[in-house]
């Protein structure tokens, strides 16, 4: 893969402008604070509170903040509340 001026080097991995990290395991898909807020359907200030509380893992890259999409999904999964009583989807009374 040829490296052009828009390709950034992040550690030993190559970061393309679409925020996909190539050539490393695991494969990171980075999201901005706005993308995280939109994904979680919360305000940007609420997303910043998640950072302040260290409730969600993030990367500090220079002055920017980025999140790995799988960490955001993991946070969302950790917020799930299981139903009480009947098994989920159980149609018996």
Image: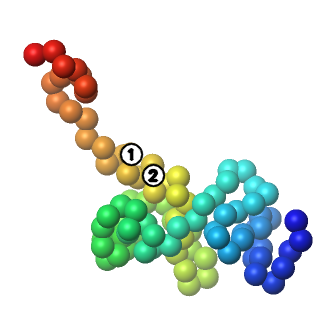
Say which quadrant the N terminus sits in.
bottom right
Q: Is residue 61 left or right of residue 38?
A: right
- In this orientation, which residue lies closer to the viewer: 25 or 38? 38
Residue shown at 77% from the left, 76% from the top: 7
Q: Residue at x 30, y 67 (%)?
A: 42
Q: Do the residues labelled 2 and 1 touch (CB within 8 Å)?
A: yes
Q: In this view, does 87 lie above or below 19?
A: above
- Residue 73, numbered circle: 2
Return the x and y of residue 54 as percentages of the image width and height: 41, 63
The correct choice, above or below, for 25 with respect to 13 in the image is above
| 31, 49: nearer the viewer | 31
Res 48 → quadrant: bottom left
Q: Where is residue 71 in the image (x, y as percent from the top left)?
A: 50, 54
Q: Where does the image place residue 47, in percent across and percent down from the top left? A: 36, 70
Mark 1, residue position: 77
Residue farthest along the top direction in this orientation: 92
Secondary structure under badge 1?
helix
- Mark 2 lies on a secondary structure that is helix
Q: Is residue 52 visible?
A: no
What residue is rendered at 25% in x and 41% in y? Answer: 81
Q: Is residue 30 left or right of residue 42?
A: right
In this view, which residue lies farthest toward the right? 2
Is the C terminus in the top left, top right, bottom left or bottom right quadrant? top left
């Amino acid at each position: 893969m040829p490296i052009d001026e828009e390709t950034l080097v992040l550690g030993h991995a190559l970061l393309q402008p679409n925020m996909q990290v190539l050539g490393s395991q695991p494969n990171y898909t980075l999201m901005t604070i706005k993308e995280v807020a939109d994904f979680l359907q919360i305000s940007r200030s609420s997303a910043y509170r998640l950072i302040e509380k260290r409730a969600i893992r993030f990367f500090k890259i220079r002055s920017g903040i980025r999140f790995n999409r799988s960490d955001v999904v993991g946070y969302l999964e950790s917020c799930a509340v299981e139903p009480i009583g009947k098994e989920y989807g159980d149609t018996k009374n």
